[in-house]
Image (tube, rainbow, N blue to C red):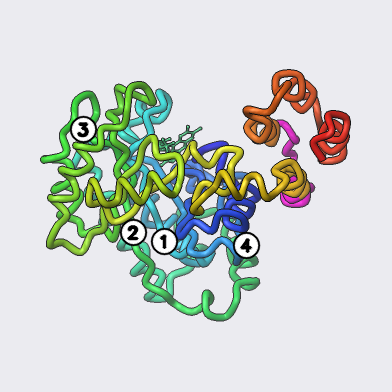
């Protein structure tokens, strides 16, 4: 999730929630191929986060092919293509959920991403890709060197799609077969249209329709939208016959959302100690970057959601510039 599921966040979620699979923030292939080295921060991860899937978006098939090589070299366990983002800037470029309106291009993007994985298996590396800058290729090769041996080996990693049920109206009956024709390993389906953005409710009946279309194929169908915890996920798996569930916003401020009895686990742990651990990892991850503490603050707001006097605590946390200042706010309010 853009602006949320960075390396420190995923590390904390994986440590306390143990989700079975985790995705990076979406990253723009045009940006990577135009030399934006800062985007490589989206592809930072540690070994605790496996299986880790890199999510990419864009509209240029040849760039998907080259970024697939980069992602293989970085040691990711899968590549996910975002065909679900409703943001205006993404939609207007024809990427994200706008690809629902250009099915031929969507198919070409999947084919090229798969071709990039084959290029890698045939020995191509980032430095050999015409649109990957030398600076990016050098950094990618450096990270590759640090991988455990098993992830340095050639592996044929899967390609998956994250999408929505339609652009302005649900079109699952046409859209899902369009994707299935390209044989993706997984389709993750958010039960809203692009037009809905995040309003209304996720339409699980449309998601159920999609599961029926995936029967007797090799593609797994994951449902998504408004699931808050493990128990609800299990209920929906049975009710809507999905192969699994993605939890997004339910994990904000609650790393236990992926585990049974998350309420009990929240009571057993001091969530504010976990918040400090998160802050410290954030600082060490981005210490040398021109990256401020600001993006960390929204997480702090989520961690204190629902506590007594949350508003006052949040105002103070939103002025914090490092983990020490966060710690003193928590101490002042007797939270740790
Ligand atoms: C702040 C924010 C950022 C998001 N970024 C992404 C993203 O980068 N890639 C993606 O596939 N979905 C993204 N989404 C959509 C979520 O993955 C998910 O589909 C949506 O929030 C519905 O699921 P939920 O109800 O479990 O949150 C984002 C959603 C939010 C709220």
- Residue 46 numbered mark, or none: 4
Determine the residue positioned at 29% across, 43% down.
189
Q: Are marks 4 and 2 in contact (CB under 8 Å)?
A: no
Q: Counting residues from the N terminus, which is met first, the one under dot 3 or under dot 1?
A: 1
**Which residue sits at x=78%, y=48%?**
280
Q: Is residue 118 left or right of residue 9?
A: left
Instruction: Give the quadrant of residue 74.
Output: bottom right
User: What is the distance, in whole Å, between disc 4 and disc 3 at their CAs?
Assistant: 36 Å
Could you tell me which residue is drawn at 31 percent across and 34 percent down? Answer: 97
Question: What quarter of the picture does the C terminus occupy?
Answer: top right
Q: Which mark is residue 159?
A: 2
Task: Report the magenta residues as a range.
Answer: 281-294
Question: Dot 2, how many residues are within 10 Å of its Cα: few (below 14), some (14-19), or many (20+)?
Answer: many
Determine crowd level at label 1: few under 14, some 14-19, many 20+ residues with C-alpha closer than 10 A. many
Q: CA distance from mark 2 to mark 3?
A: 21 Å
Q: Earlier in the sequence, mark 4 or mark 2?
A: 4
State which tag comes first along the sequence, 2 or 3: 3
Residue of label 3: 101
Badge nearest the viewer, 4 or 2: 4
**How far is disc 1 from disc 2 in space, using C-alphas?**
6 Å
Identify residue for label 1: 78
Residue 218 horizontal/vertical position (percent): 20, 64
Q: Nearer the observer, disc 4 or disc 3? A: 4
Point out the tag, 1 or 2, that comes first from the N-terminus: 1
Tell me residue 152's x, y (percent): 53, 76
Mark earlier in primary sequence (4, 3): 4
Q: Secondary structure at mark 4?
A: loop
Q: CA distance from mark 1 to mark 4?
A: 15 Å
């Amino acid at each position: 999730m853009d602006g949320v599921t960075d390396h420190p966040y995923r590390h904390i979620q994986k440590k306390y929630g143990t989700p079975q699979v985790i995705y990076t923030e979406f990253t723009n292939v045009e940006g990577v191929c135009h030399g934006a080295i800062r985007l490589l921060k989206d592809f930072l991860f540690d070994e605790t986060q496996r299986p880790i899937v890199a999510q990419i978006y864009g509209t240029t098939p040849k760039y998907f092919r080259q970024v697939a090589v980069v992602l293989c070299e970085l040691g990711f366990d899968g590549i996910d293509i975002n065909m679900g983002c409703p943001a205006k800037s993404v939609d207007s470029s024809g990427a994200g959920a706008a690809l629902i309106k250009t099915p031929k291009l969507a198919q070409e993007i999947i084919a090229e991403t798969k071709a990039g994985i084959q290029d890698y298996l045939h020995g191509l590396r980032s430095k050999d890709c015409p649109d990957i800058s030398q600076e990016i290729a050098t950094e990618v090769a450096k990270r590759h060197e640090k991988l455990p041996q098993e992830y340095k080996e050639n592996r044929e990693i899967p390609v998956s799609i994250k999408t929505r049920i339609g652009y302005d109206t649900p079109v699952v009956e046409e859209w899902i077969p369009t994707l299935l024709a390209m044989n993706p390993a997984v389709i993750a389906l958010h039960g809203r249209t692009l037009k809905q953005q995040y309003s209304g409710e996720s339409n699980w009946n449309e998601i159920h329709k999609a599961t029926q279309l995936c029967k007797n194929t090799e593609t797994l169908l994951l449902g998504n939208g408004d699931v808050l915890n493990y128990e609800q996920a299990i209920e929906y798996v049975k009710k809507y016959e999905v192969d699994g569930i993605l939890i997004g916003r339910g994990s904000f401020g609650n790393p236990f959302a992926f585990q049974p009895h998350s309420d009990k686990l929240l009571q057993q742990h001091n969530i504010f100690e976990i918040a400090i651990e998160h802050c410290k990892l954030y600082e060490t991850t981005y210490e040398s970057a021109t990256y401020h503490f600001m993006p960390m603050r929204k997480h702090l707001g989520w961690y204190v959601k629902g506590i007594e006097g949350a508003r006052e605590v949040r105002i103070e946390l939103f002025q914090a510039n490092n983990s020490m200042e966060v710690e003193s706010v928590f101490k002042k309010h007797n939270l740790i």
